[in-house]
Amino acid sequence: MISANYLHPKKTRKMKMKNPVSPNFASDDGGHFGEFGGRFAPEMLMPALIELEEIYKECQQDEAFQKEFFDCLKTFSGRPTPLLYAENLSKHLGGAKIYLKQEGLGQTGSHKINNAIGQALLTKRMGKKRVIAETGAGQHGFATATVCAKFGLQCEIFMGAVDIKRQRPNVFWMEQLGAKVHPVEFGQKTLKDAVNAALKDWITNVETTHYLLGSALGPHPYPSMVRDFQSVIGIEIKQQVKEAENKLPDTIIACVGGGSNSMGAFNAFLHEDVQLIGIEAGGKGLESNQHAIRFKGGKVGVVEAYKSFFLQDEDGQLKETHSIAAGLDYPGVGPQLAHLQKEKRVSFEHTTDDEVVDALKTVMKYEGIIPALESSHAIAHTIKIAPTLPKDHVIVTNVSGRGDKDIFLIAQALKDDKWFEFLQSQLDERNKNE
């Protein structure tokens, strides 16, 4: 795990990423978190996964790697990200004190850059020149394309055709950065299908290619490795809240797709007396079957090389999912989160699309912040519970990304005709000039 020492330049050489969490919550040597996790991968991928695990273990103890990683976090990504006391929102709701961890103010507009930097440096260490990645909301693809441009790596991104339509701004920037974006046309054409496409490519090109997986899931060592690279979020929260409140936060809330931003925020607090709440995508409601609520609607299975909770039908096939947020409609969840839910260390709730849009409007009105639709799930639950809590209760909500990428979806949800009239005028002008 990352040490908070990276905030203090003079202590840089003492930094380690060794994971100090309680044995009840950590994985074993095979990447099992209790009954979850593991490495159920095709035989052709096993050498690459073992190599990745060995290289990562070396880099955990390598001061040169640590220094380069933390220097990149600071000078390239802009860490530490701010922790904002949402004074206006807190007063409006009349309950707990709300702080917003603004991951969207980092490079590429989300937390995804932390892991992308770490894995890009590992790719260099392994001597590989080609990187592939999957993406749903496009933020991981954007981050991957960015680090590949910086470090001179060939980049190819797999993205569901439906998500490409929903997240066109990120696709545009990925391509401008030199990445090749592959539309995935099979299945539901969303994130789970992009993961499958990336795995198939990796099997074919395993000797020259690193799969820069974006969330805390997949075969070992990815769940632990992604968590560790993202754990900088929680370490910063711990220090920033202590400086602001002279205590630890009482509650931390984060949205949950696969688990990268939530595990990043939670990991530093697993053995502290802090309530941890993960928010899943409620879509159109649990009874509608148009959602991504894994812990209430799913069951245990092995999918895409790891064991966890997945939304499955009676035959064990993955169900279709739905969320207004492209980054949360994945049918599975990271194995450590599954274990933490079973151990009752993290509780899970869900918010619907309508609640998410209302939360987005509220935080824009009172704080002047435009969060991503994914992050707005966590904000929606914060708005729901804050009025029920005492005024000295401190909530930290991880705003894992900003809403630039969602402009088309938000405009549609808010029924903003002026925006679409503008788009039509631009199209008309282009056709006229041609």
Image (spheres, helix red, strand yellow):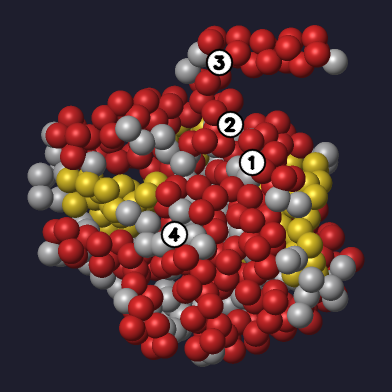
Residue at 55%, 43% in the rendered image: 328
Question: Which labelled disc corresponds to residue 170?
Answer: 1
Which of the two discs, 3 and 2, labels the residue nearer the N terminus?
2
Residue at 79%, 66% in the rendered image: 130
Q: Which residue is mark 4?
A: 78
Mark 4–mark 2 Cα distance, whole angstroms, equals 37 Å
Residue 135 placed where, x, y %? 66, 49
Residue 290 visible somewhere in the drawing: yes
Report the residue that reaches farthest toward the right.
Answer: 204
From the viewer's perspective, tell me whether residue 296 is left or right of residue 369. Answer: right
Mark 3–mark 1 Cα distance, whole angstroms, equals 19 Å
Report the residue that reaches farthest toward the left.
Answer: 391
Dot 2: few (<14), some (14–19), or many (≥20) neighbours within 10 Å? some
Which of the two discs, 3 and 4, labels the residue nearer the N terminus?
4
Query: For the residue labelled by badge 4, is the local secondary structure a helix, a strand or a loop?
Result: loop
Question: Which labelled disc corresponds to residue 419?
Answer: 3
Mark in the foreground, 2 or 1: 1
From the viewer's perspective, tell me whether residue 131 is left or right of residue 285. Answer: right
